[in-house]
Amino acid sequence: MELVNELQGLRERVLCNLVLDKIAGWPFRRLESGMKRFLGLCLLFIIFEASELLVFGIVKISILQSLVPSILTAFIAALCIHVVSCCYQHTLVELGAVATTPALGSGVEKALVNWLRKTTNIWFQLLWSCGVTVAVILALYVIKQRATLSIPYGPGLLFGAGLVFFWLGQIWYWAVFAPFATRLLRGSDASEIGLDPLYPNETPILVAMSRTLSVYALWHGFVATLCLILLFTLQPDFGEGGTRYVLVFVLLSYLISFWTFLYPQFNLSQLVYRAKQDTLLKIRAESSKLYENLDKLERADFERLENLRGLHDTVSKWRNTVVGFSGLRSFIASLIMPALTAFVGFKLQSFMA
């Protein structure tokens, strides 16, 4: 039950939830939660858009010239907050249901609670997002110098890009650190996790972790796709140098999706494999005890041997992976979306040229 309480309290320590629920959702606090969050998201979009138009006005860029980039960047920044919030809600549903089952041991529950308290440090989240923002803006400057792109590298674009990458940094934060939770499970005792000895890959806590991180990979691919759309909108003609950097961005998106999906699946598979081998070892040990007294076996003992052999075959044929079709589908979608967007963008550029 401690894990459920921790997950409920996590809302106020995740930066995106804090902004969406406490700040943007405050004017609509009397409404139901779903409508409150939707209106809060709309309010954030309006605030982001107004602040960008204000900056563009200060640097004397016409509204018509800055309207499309500002709308896109404000939309993506607000969407990043929504993505982290949705992932939190999904995690709350998946792990909250598992935490109420008596099969989950107190040791694992305590380890997950301690891990959550460390990763939800609000100052570390802020530092991470600021670091991502500075790194990306410096990278844009280097790309502009080396690829000779006509990027309007001014205060207006810096503000819009900073707004996007600050909140995109929150998605990257959870995409990088969330998979480490599976390492805690991998080092835990099977009895603490409540592993099913016959079907360990159907253990609730493992299935919940697998589904949650599959959704993380899907949402990351979706937001990376929107960032590519923004990039193609701001820079209609890349040229040879720019094309290379777009492909690097797609590969970076792939690396994050692979990390968010494959690393936890590897940890969970190792856990299932270990539990499976322990079960097979126990079956063999039980069979060996019967074979030691082979001359004294009765009919019931032979039936028991036959049952143990069938059980051994059943367990040995069971797959080691935890991920289901829905999780695999989410991962594939996270890979297809950015690549498809880049392909369509390049085709449109060649057509317009």
Image (cartoon, grey):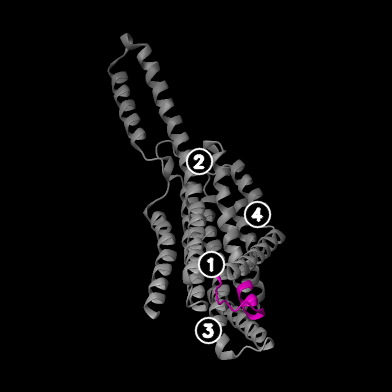
The secondary structure type at the circle numbered 3 is helix
Which residues, given as a range, are shown in magenta? 147-162
Confirm or deny contact between disc 1 and disc 4 (CB under 8 A).
Answer: no
Residue 277, image quadrant: top left
Residue count near mark 3 (Cα–Cα under 10 Å), binned few <14, some 14–19, many ≥20? some
Q: Earlier in the sequence, mark 1 or mark 2?
A: 1
Q: Earlier in the sequence, mark 4 or mark 2?
A: 4
Query: Is 272 within the magenta?
Result: no
Q: Is residue 156 above or below residue 322?
A: below
Say which of marks 1 and 3 sits in front: 3
Task: Identify the residue position indicated by label 2 in the image.
Answer: 194
| Residue visible at 51% across and 65% down in the picture | 245
The circle on residue 119 is 4
- The one of 197 and 339 positioned closer to us in this rendering: 339
The circle on residue 68 is 3
Q: Earlier in the sequence, mark 1 or mark 4?
A: 1
Q: Is residue 227 left or right of residue 47?
A: left
In the orientation shown, which residue stands out farthest toward the right? 123
The circle on residue 83 is 1
